[in-house]
Structure formats: structure tokens, C-alpha cells
Image (cartoon, grey):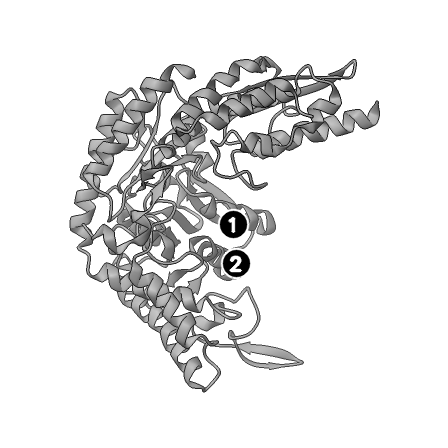
């Protein structure tokens, strides 16, 4: 079961028909992700394959996921916000219930194929892979 | 301008809006005649070329070779080797000519303005053969530093330069570059992927040794391009891909090769694509490219000025011979955000480094938004772009 906050946002998004309004909504979600200051942007937390500069840091503390992110493109930052709604401060199993399809439901990207250069899928894969590795280590 | 209704894709809608296609420097749309020619081949004449004697093979061979004949005429070229595109054409020079003629210590001159396709093959050859690479810098006015170019020539065996920049639209002084290179004893390779769609290039008049071109940027299909080669340079080339079609005789002891362009076209070639490209050139024969160049340049100049008025930085100068490419950035909105928001309104523009990272590094940026115009684009579409961008900046401009 995904987080309630993510569920609510997906429902709200589903009601927005105008594409520009969707973008506006996603842009506003940028505020949902805890900021990873530019000084903390490293090669380790860089989202590779992103046309914009995008960095994500993920940790597990007391069984809960902690996420911080930053990007120079507002859309990418907004999608990080969507990720944060589904994962940040959530129990690991709730965070891991989020799939890339939930990002697709935002309906602002034409494609989320693995080769897509904007790297949104890479961003999602990066977080989920790290969570898997960390949860295996626990 | 051409009749936009000749291009079926231009009547479709994108995100509920009429498509305005401004990504022509990446690839152009195809007229119905090109689509029909390829369909016709697959429907009625599909066969492999050259060695068979049956009727279909004859039709396929005639169709394929007719493309070469058209290309020879279009570019006034002595030799035309069919490739998968500009990238393979440049790699053919690197492997087919470079390996046979360049030794450790020889120099190849490149520029900071090159597409990655005209940098990476040379870096690979440099690593393999110890060839020295010399880069001509780009000046603040976005032209090549011609003094540095001339200084780079002593000891150079080859000069590789882009005819027209895919980022800036700047058309380089290729006549002067070729003349200087030849005077210094160097051969010249022109990357004409962006230049060829906008102007007729006569390689014999230019005396250029190699010219690389892609079909899909001049109304033809993807997956095919060519390398024109001067006869004396052709004699210096050795094949780098072996296989069917390129041989004369094969025995277990060894092989001999064909004497003509087939020597560099191992394997079954792109037959349908060649037939499509021929149809594209037939279409272009009916277009006054000089008049179109002026019309499109005027649209680009107007767009550049309008974007500047909106607070954008425009990268390019739009001189008389430059192509209709407008690369820009706005301080309040990331290039990728802008491209998404324009797409939402039906405008297809490109964003990113445009496979020219050294140039963007020189300009101190990592990406631009690029609108590139071609034969079917109109001033009304440029006005629509500026209007759409105004809307984007009003609604999202403060989001950065």
C-alpha cells in the first residue's frame, strides 16, 4: 500500500485535464522534497543520465526512509517531490510499494523508457536500488 | 515555401494542439512522396541488390544506384559512398582513410564547434595511433579563431570542420579553410549534416576531399547518409568493414576487393532508405533553396530578436549564410522545463547539449533550448512560439 499523501496527489492529478495545469501542479510539488543543498551534491548522489543536474540522497533511519533532493530543472524537482510524498518519512515497505507507474500517472512525461535521457526513471531506479541494498544490509 | 500538406505528420495534433515542428536540426519531416517511394519498394520491388538477375533484384538495384547517381549530381561528386549517416561517414574517414594514412605524430585539426560525431572517432584514432589532435577555439563572437586555425596547420594531415554548427547555426568560412588546409598539404573533411539541407554544396568547386551528410536532415529517411570522396583521396582509402558486396574474389587464402564505392559498403545496404532519399532529393529539386534560405533566416532573425526582448540569451549571430537555428536560454526557467512546457502547447523544440559538449563548455553553459526551422515552417509558427513562450514565462517564470 502506497502512502496516503501520494495517493491523494495521484487522485488530484487525475482530475487535472489541462497539461499546463498539470505542470503547474508538479512544479509546486518541488517544495515537498527536503532540499539537498548544492554543497552536498556529489558524484555518489548524482542522478546519472539526467539532462539537468539532479541529486538524490536516500537513507533509512529506524525503519523509515529519509529522502533529500535537488535539481536545477523545476520539473525534475517536482517529480522528486512526488517521490518524497511516496517515500519520505515512510516505513520501508510503504516506500517500496511505490512504482515508476505512479510517476507516469503524473502525466507530464511522454515516455519513461530506460533510455529516456531526462533520467526520471533512472532517478526512481536509483532510489529503489539503494533502498533494496540498504534493506538487505539491515 | 513548400506546401505543408505534402507532409502528412504536420496535420496531427500534439497534446490537443496543432503540431509546430521546430526540431529540424535533429531530423526533418518526410513528404508523402518519400513515404510512398519506400512503401512502393517494399510493396512491389523488395529484393536484395546487385548480384541476382531476377526482375525484382534489378528493380531494387536500379533504385539503390539511382540514389547514388542523384547524390553525385546533387553534390557534383566524383565518389559517393553510402553510409548509415554522417556519423558513419566520418567514422569511415577515420578508419578507411585515417588508419591507412596517419602515423604517430601526425596531426588532425578539429574545432571546438564540432558535433561529437566529429570528435570521438578522432579521439579513438588518436588513442590507437598516437595522432595529435589540435582544436581550433571558438571566439566570443561565436566564429572560429582563424588565426589559431592557420597556426594549427603545419604538420597537419587532415582538417575536420563542421560546415554549419548544429547549435549556433554559424556557417564556417569553409572555402578559406579548405584553401588554407590544401596549401599546408592537409586533406579536409566537412561535416555537412546541417549545411547540406539548407544550401547546394558543390564539392568539386569547393575542392573538399570528404563531405559527410545525413539523409534524414534533408527530408529523407533515417538510417542513411553518404560520404563524398575526391578521386585521389578515394585511392588512399582501405576498407575497414569486410563482408558481402564489397569483394571481388574470396578464396580461403585471401580476398580481393571491388574498385568502386561498393568496397566500402559491406553487407546488404539500406535499399528502401536509398529509394526514399532519392525521392527526397527529387522533392528538393523543386525547391528554390536560396530563396528558402533567406526566408528561413528572416524567421530565425525575427525569433532571436523577439526572444531577446523576452529576456532570453540567444546563442548565434544569424549572418547571411548562417542557418535558421535559434538556440536560447532564459534565466528564470531551465531549458528542460521550457521544452516540456512548449511541448504541452504543441511546439516541438530540442533541449540539451545537442551532442556538442565542448562548444557548450566554451559558451559556459550545459544546455540550450533550440528551435530550428525548415522548409515547411512559417513566420506565423515563429510568432506562435514566441507567444507560447510568453505564456510559459508568465505562468512559470518565477519558478526557477
Q: Are marks 1 and 2 in contact (CB under 8 Å)?
A: yes
Foreground residue among B31 and B225: B31
Q: Residue at x 18, y 49 (%)?
A: B1
Residue A71 visible in image: yes
Judge by depth and name the residue closer to the eye, A76 or B124.
A76
In the picture, the disc for residue B95 is 2
In which quadrant of the rendered view does residue B318 lie? top left
The image quarter containing residue B400 is top left
Image x and y of residue B244, in percent: 55, 74
Q: How many marks?
A: 2
Q: Position of residue B397 (x, y in %)?
A: 36, 18
Q: Is A124 placed left or right of B288 in the picture?
A: right
Q: Position of residue B218 (x, y in %)?
A: 32, 54
Mark seen at residue A92: none
**How far apart are the alpha carbons under marks 1 and 2?**
9 Å
Q: From the top left corner, tell me how far across and down residue A85 is, in percent.
A: 61, 19
Q: Which residue is mark 1?
A: B121
Q: Within the image, what quadrant is residue B370 found in?
A: top left
Extreme left residue here?
B291
Q: Is residue B189 left or right of residue B386?
A: right
| Residue A53 vertical placement versus A111 (above, below) | above
Q: Chain of mark 2?
A: B
Q: Is residue B168 visible?
A: no
Give the answer, above or below, for where A40 lies relative to B212.
above
Protein chain holding label 1: B
| Discs 1 and 2 carry the same chain letter | yes
- In the picture, measured across the screen, residue B192 lies left or right of residue B84, that is left
Under circle 2, the secondary element is helix
- Secondary element under disc 1, as helix, strand or loop, is helix
Amino acid at each position: 500500500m502506497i502512502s496516503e499523501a501520494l495517493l491523494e496527489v495521484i487522485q488530484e492529478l487525475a482530475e487535472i485535464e489541462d497539461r499546463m495545469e498539470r505542470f503547474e501542479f508538479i512544479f509546486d510539488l518541488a517544495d515537498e522534497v527536503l532540499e539537498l543543498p548544492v554543497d552536498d551534491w556529489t558524484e555518489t548522489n548524482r542522478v546519472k543520465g539526467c539532462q539537468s543536474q539532479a541529486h538524490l540522497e536516500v537513507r533509512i533511519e529506524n525503519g523509515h526512509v529519509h529522502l533529500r533532493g535537488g535539481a536545477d530543472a523545476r520539473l525534475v524537482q517536482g517529480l522528486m517531490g512526488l517521490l518524497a510524498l511516496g517515500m519520505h518519512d515512510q516505513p520501508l515497505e510503504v516506500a517500496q510499494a511505490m512504482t515508476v507507474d505512479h510517476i507516469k500517472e503524473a502525466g507530464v512525461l511522454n515516455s519513461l523508457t530506460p533510455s529516456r535521457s531526462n533520467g526520471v526513471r533512472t532517478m526512481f531506479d536509483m532510489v529503489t536500488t539503494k533502498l533494496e541494498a540498504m534493506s538487505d544490509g539491515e | 515555401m513548400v506546401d505543408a500538406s505534402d507532409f502528412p505528420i504536420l496535420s496531427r495534433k500534439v497534446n490537443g494542439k496543432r503540431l509546430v515542428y521546430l526540431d529540424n536540426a535533429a531530423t526533418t519531416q518526410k513528404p508523402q512522396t518519400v513515404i510512398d517511394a519506400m512503401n512502393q519498394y517494399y510493396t512491389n520491388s523488395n529484393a536484395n541488390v546487385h548480384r541476382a538477375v531476377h526482375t525484382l533484384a534489378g528493380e531494387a538495384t536500379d533504385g539503390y544506384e539511382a540514389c547514388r547517381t542523384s547524390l553525385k549530381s546533387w553534390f557534383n561528386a566524383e565518389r559517393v559512398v553510402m553510409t548509415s549517416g554522417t556519423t558513419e561517414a566520418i567514422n569511415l574517414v577515420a578508419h578507411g582513410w585515417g588508419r591507412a594514412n596517419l602515423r604517430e605524430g601526425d596531426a588532425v585539426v578539429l574545432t571546438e564547434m564540432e558535433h561529437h560525431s566529429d570528435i570521438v572517432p578522432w579521439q579513438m584514432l588518436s588513442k590507437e595511433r598516437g595522432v595529435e589532435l589540435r582544436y581550433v577555439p571558438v571566439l566570443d563572437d561565436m566564429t572560429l579563431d582563424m588565426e589559431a586555425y592557420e597556426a594549427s596547420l603545419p604538420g597537419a594531415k587532415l582538417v575536420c570542420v563542421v560546415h554549419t554548427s548544429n547549435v549556433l547555426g554559424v556557417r564556417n568560412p569553409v572555402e578559406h579553410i579548405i584553401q588554407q588546409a590544401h596549401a599546408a598539404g592537409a586533406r579536409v573533411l566537412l561535416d555537412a549534416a546541417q549545411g547540406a539541407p539548407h544550401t547546394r554544396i558543390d564539392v568539386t568547386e569547393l575542392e573538399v576531399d570528404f563531405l559527410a551528410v545525413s539523409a534524414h536532415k534533408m527530408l529523407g529517411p533515417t538510417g542513411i547518409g553518404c560520404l563524398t570522396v575526391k578521386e585521389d583521396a578515394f585511392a588512399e582509402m582501405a576498407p575497414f568493414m569486410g563482408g558481402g558486396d564489397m569483394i571481388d574474389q574470396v578464396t580461403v587464402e585471401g580476398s580481393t576487393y571491388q574498385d568502386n564505392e561498393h568496397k566500402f559498403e559491406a553487407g546488404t545496404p539500406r535499399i528502401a532508405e536509398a529509394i526514399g532519399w532519392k525521392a527526397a532529393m527529387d522533392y528538393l529539386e523543386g525547391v528554390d533553396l536560396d530563396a528558402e534560405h533567406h526566408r528561413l533566416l528572416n524567421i530565425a532573425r525575427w525569433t532571436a530578436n523577439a526572444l531577446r526582448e523576452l529576456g532570453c540569451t540567444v546563442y548565434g549571430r544569424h549572418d547571411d549564410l548562417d542557418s535558421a537555428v535559434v538556440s536560447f536560454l532564459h534565466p528564470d526557467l531551465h531549458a528542460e522545463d521550457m521544452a516540456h512546457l512548449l511541448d504541452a502547447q504543441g511546439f516541438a523544440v530540442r533541449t540539451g547539449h545537442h551532442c556538442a559538449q565542448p562548444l557548450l563548455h566554451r559558451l559556459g553553459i550545459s544546455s540550450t533550448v533550440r528551435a530550428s526551422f525548415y522548409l515547411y515552417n512559417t513566420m506565423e509558427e515563429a510568432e506562435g512560439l514566441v507567444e507560447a513562450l510568453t505564456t510559459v514565462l508568465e505562468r512559470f517564470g518565477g519558478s526557477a
